[in-house]
Amino acid sequence: MRLLYAFLLATWAWGSSGTIQDPASLVLPFIGTTNGGHVFPGKTPSPSRVMSPEQSLARCDTPKWNGKGRDGHRLVGKRELKSQAGYDADPIFNAIGFSQLHDSGTGGGIPLSNFKLWPIANCTSFGRCRTSSFIRGIQRKILNDNTPDDFASPGYFSTNLSSDIRVELAAARRAALHRYTFPSSSTIPRMIVGIDDGQHSGRDQELTINSKTARVQGGATFSGSFGPGEYRAFACADFKGEGFDLGAPEEFGLWQSNSPTQGATNLKDISDGFSSEVGALFGFQQAANGSTTILARVGVSFISSEQACRNAEEDIPDFDFDRVHGENRAQWNDLLGRIQVDTTGVSEDTVKLFYSSVYRSYISPADYSGENPKWNSTEPYYDSYYCNWDTYRTLYSLMALQDPEKFARIVRAMIDIQKNEGWLPECRGATLQQLIQGGSNADPILGEFWVKYHDQAAALGVNGDDLYTALLADAENESPNWDLQGRQADAWKTLNYIPHDTIDFRGTNTRQVSRTLEYAFDDFAISQVAKIRGNAQDAAKYAKRAGNYFNVWNPNTTVPGTPSIKGMMQPRLSNGTFDFTDPRHCSIHDPTHSTCFLDSNNHDGFYEGPVDEVFAGKLFFASPSSIDLLNVSSSFIDRLDFIFEEGYFEPTDEPSQQMPYMYHYANRPGLSTQRSRQVIAQNFRTTVDGLPGNDDSGAMGSYAAFYLAGLYPLPATRQFLLSSPYFPSISFFNPLFNSTTTIKSIGFEGNPESGTGGKVFVQSVSVNGQPYKSNCYLEWDVFTSGSTVELTLTDDVGVTCGDGPDALPPSLSTGGYD
Ligand SMILES: *[C@@H]1O[C@H](CO)[C@@H](O)[C@H](O)[C@H]1NC(C)=O
Ligand SMILES: *[C@@H]1O[C@H](CO)[C@@H](O)[C@H](O)[C@H]1NC(C)=O
Ligand SMILES: *[C@@H]1O[C@H](CO)[C@@H](O)[C@H](O)[C@H]1NC(C)=O
Ligand SMILES: *[C@@H]1O[C@H](CO)[C@@H](O)[C@H](O)[C@H]1NC(C)=O
Ligand SMILES: *[C@@H]1O[C@H](CO)[C@@H](O)[C@H](O)[C@H]1NC(C)=O
Ligand SMILES: *[C@@H]1O[C@H](CO)[C@@H](O)[C@H](O)[C@H]1NC(C)=O
Ligand SMILES: *[C@@H]1O[C@H](CO)[C@@H](O)[C@H](O)[C@H]1NC(C)=O
Ligand SMILES: *[C@@H]1O[C@H](CO)[C@@H](O)[C@H](O)[C@H]1NC(C)=O
């Protein structure tokens, strides 16, 4: 069966050279598009293209439940019928339009989802067309297996509506091209262009149409989706017949809510000022042979509708759907193809899970260069960091391996934001500062860049002084609002932890223990940068502050009912006395079913994870001093086993991502291999509900990609923890160094489906034919120089990191990272 899979794949994805020529064909964009995954499956602009203020353009917006839900937020039973990405694979969601801007995999309110186009096959008359997105929705066609008739691949989306209209979408830099094919029974094919968003928050709209050319220009003010603030966004739509001359529209007008006014061309003339949704409505002439195909080109901008028109004209001058789609796909293939895998003996699902996970790592952040309404700059401008707290752990380390040029542009954009606003971005969306979940987690992202690319930084346009200045602003300056920017720095500097009792009106007094651990890690990243910059004094200062996690460690706290599990991170009062949070808090054993999200009634000091998990998941940079906290490494292993076996491991949120690999620090890498493979087996599938929780803007995608590659990154260090890849061979091409590093598994026999057992444990490692110093990690220079790494596999889970002095992964408490 496995061989058959490999053969089938070879016929459509492989080239004659044995490399995967069309990895885009292995991407399943629908993974995580229902059941709360909030993944956006529509066409995404190519990653290597410089521009894309919309990180993905039009998509099928389906936040309505068969016309019964009023606003897409209705709860049916326990199920929340809203879709942050604007799409849900579940057929109970109706289609209501195809919008231009979106995020992928987020929580919060529905972000963006602006400017929905909607085709109408037939209305009784212009004035009776259903224009409001609340009531115009219809089902997609439902296939025999009860799935909607939707298709997506990188850069392309199509669906067949129950109105017999076929919809296809492709994306360019700042513009989308839509193709609507109407049935011949549609004698007046009509199109809606909405000036709207996913939250129905639009106000102060502007909208004009040209009655001869059917050009639509409009914009409005909309609300941020995960915090305060408003943004303005603009669109410009043009239409063209495919294969026939569309001519001037036969009918035209504007609408507000569900009320079209035929003949109106300027919203000012009819506006009631109260509608959150307004738009244009056209009736076009039918094509002579009855099969009317209308192309709609929609430019977007955060500056003006004139700029939206220019963007559209520049990006898609020709209305050539196949060109737009083909260029986009070629760019995805260039990016995805930098990682090559040998699929011999590997299931098709695993290959697709891998490339789909890599794909989702490159949807956010988005390149909004030239579209920043807040200041003019020659630096790149990236937006949609939703949020750095989610993505700093794995996403940028994948980018460091695969796309250093893009990484450098994002770092430059972050530094430019700090120069202009005073603070690095944390959770930025639609040009707005949004709510911070953890620390100032741009710090480890900049740290990751500097540790890996300081020698190339100048050539990549990154100024080291500016980067360091930006980091110090986070580390040293008290933020006037630490919910949106920076840190609660004064308390951090005076107490060396975040106190549980002090009420400070500059931010929400919650998540104190979690923030202590995040600030500690942020300072670790800064110490790494300082060290490379030759600033030994700062390196020592921030390394010391990285040890502040110890200040919230109460060695006496136990899990109720399990006294042997002793020592916990705990909230601490400003006078030094410990407060108490039940370590079962937020776990499946929580007797009080408390929340650990951003709610104001979360007073326990923790965020998105049980207490024990927060402990074990955050401290890799200090391990084995986190092992020292428990005094002996055998009890550290017991502790990790307890977390997994008793259900404290939380796969849906990021604080736990590191935990399966923590066995490395106790010299038991085989246990890491097994746990990480069990996490994949139990939580990641290629199905529409194949994700644990939200994808969080690629945080889960990059995490799964690393697990499948047999690596786990340690951001802001030169090390990757090492396990065994799911492939007999995997190679990483770095375009900056023009080097390829290949990891080969000697004796590969496939991957046990349950993740348990198998010949998957790393017994020994050689690099370029020489025995390597450790079986537990690889240094960055292995990847920069282009190396052949050979892993000898065994079925013995009891393997170790090796015998040499450098066998264990480095850590702060054993002398730090070189
Ligand atoms: C929609 O219908 C067309 C035929 O009209 C077909 O080619 C296509 O595969 C169908 N499905 C999708 C998702 O486009
Ligand atoms: C469109 O509406 C007209 C008038 O109600 C009706 O005769 C015709 O069948 C409809 N066409 C379609 C495609 O529904
Ligand atoms: C109608 O004409 C267009 C343009 O020439 C062509 O692409 C399309 O295939 C034709 N459709 C039918 C049903 O003949
Ligand atoms: C940027 O420059 C343009 C052209 O000079 C100007 O119109 C615009 O107001 C400037 N934007 C900002 C935010 O300063
Ligand atoms: C833990 O218990 C020991 C022994 O009772 C005590 O000396 C120590 O102060 C306690 N530590 C904390 C932080 O409560
Ligand atoms: C710290 O404050 C708490 C709460 O007010 C109090 O119960 C505790 O005794 C204080 N500890 C010290 C050492 O003063
Ligand atoms: C570890 O054990 C030693 C004595 O066995 C004790 O002095 C020390 O405080 C312990 N460390 C922690 C962090 O509990
Ligand atoms: C990159 O490396 C390959 C061989 O590994 C070589 O053929 C090619 O010329 C190199 N390209 C550049 C731009 O140096």
Image: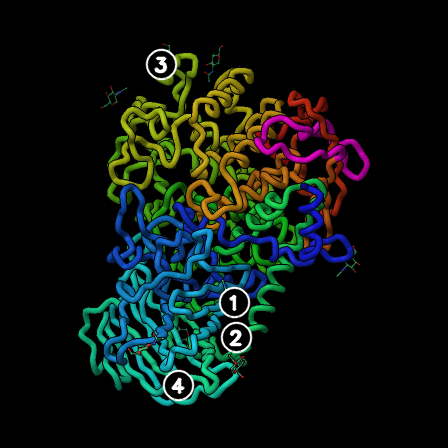
Q: Give the number of callouts.
A: 4
Q: Which residues are magenta?
A: 746-775
Pick whichever of labels 3 and 1 is earlier in the sequence. Answer: 1
* CB of mark 4 near ligand 3 (< 8 Å): no
Q: Main secondary structure of the magenta part?
A: loop
Residues 79 and 568: in front is: 79
Q: Residue 367: say if magenta.
A: no
Q: Residues within 10 Å of mark 3 (few under 14, many from 20)?
A: few
Residue under the image location 24 percent in, 66 percent down: 276
Q: Nearer the viewer, mark 4 or mark 3?
A: 4
The circle on residue 315 is 2
- Amino acid carrying mark 3 in the image: Gly
| Ligand 4 within 8 Å, label 1 CB | no
User: Which mark is on residue 285?
Assistant: 4
Q: CA distance from mark 4 to mark 1?
A: 35 Å
Residue of label 3: 561
Q: Secondary structure at mark 3?
A: loop
Q: Dot 1: few (<14), some (14–19), or many (≥20) neighbours within 10 Å?
A: many
Tell me the distance, in whole angstroms, between the alpha carbons under discs 1 and 2: 10 Å
As measured in the structure, the alpha-carbon distance from the residue carrying label 4 to the one carrying label 3 is 75 Å
Residue 51, numbered label: 1
